[in-house]
Amino acid sequence: MKNKGILFLLLSGLLLASSCKKYVQRQETNALISIITSGVWMVTHYADSGADITSNFTGYTFQFYANGTVDGIKAGVAQPGTWVGNINAHTITSNFPAAGSPLDKLNAVWTITDSYTDSVSANCVIGTDTNYLSLKKQ
């Protein structure tokens, strides 16, 4: 009888620990989505294989939405795209399928290297080249 009681306590503890972990992960995801979707972002630095092309993004702002879409907006014209964040991998994947340059430069899986509530830095490796991106919230 004691063994059944101990087994019940262990199983209850494991179930509770699993539920708490999922709750914490859900809260982290919700906080990240809130930070990303509240406000408009702009590119403050973009290095393409060592070449600074930040000026190509002049006039663009980016509005991220909780449903996984993003608009790249310039002069009131929005180019639609998608984004997916992965907290565990510290990545964000962005895709602007119908956009030309410079927005097509954002189509990648970006590894977050530094982040705050109002800025983020990331890089992506494409072949043998590494691109660097910094965004700041306006």
Image (tube, rainbow, N blue to C red):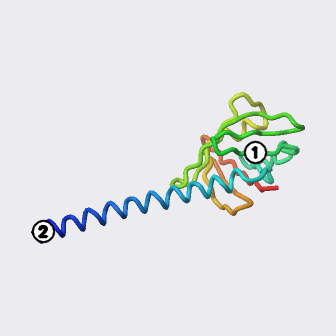
- Residue at 24% x, 66% y: name it: 10
**Amino acid beneath label 1:** Gln
Residue 118 at x, y percent in the picture? 74, 60
Left or right, 98 with reference to 52: left
**Amino acid beneath label 2:** Asn
User: Which residue is more in the foreground, 35 or 119?
Assistant: 35
- Residue at 17% x, 68% y: name it: 5
Left or right, 86 with reference to 50: left
Residue 102 at x, y percent in the picture? 78, 37
User: Which residue is more in the foreground, 16 or 33?
Assistant: 16
Left or right, 73 with reference to 37: right
User: Which residue is more in the foreground, 90 or 55?
Assistant: 90
Q: Secondary structure at mark 1?
A: strand
Residue denoted by label 2: 3
Which quarter of the figure has residue 17?
bottom left
Most extreme residue toward the top is 98
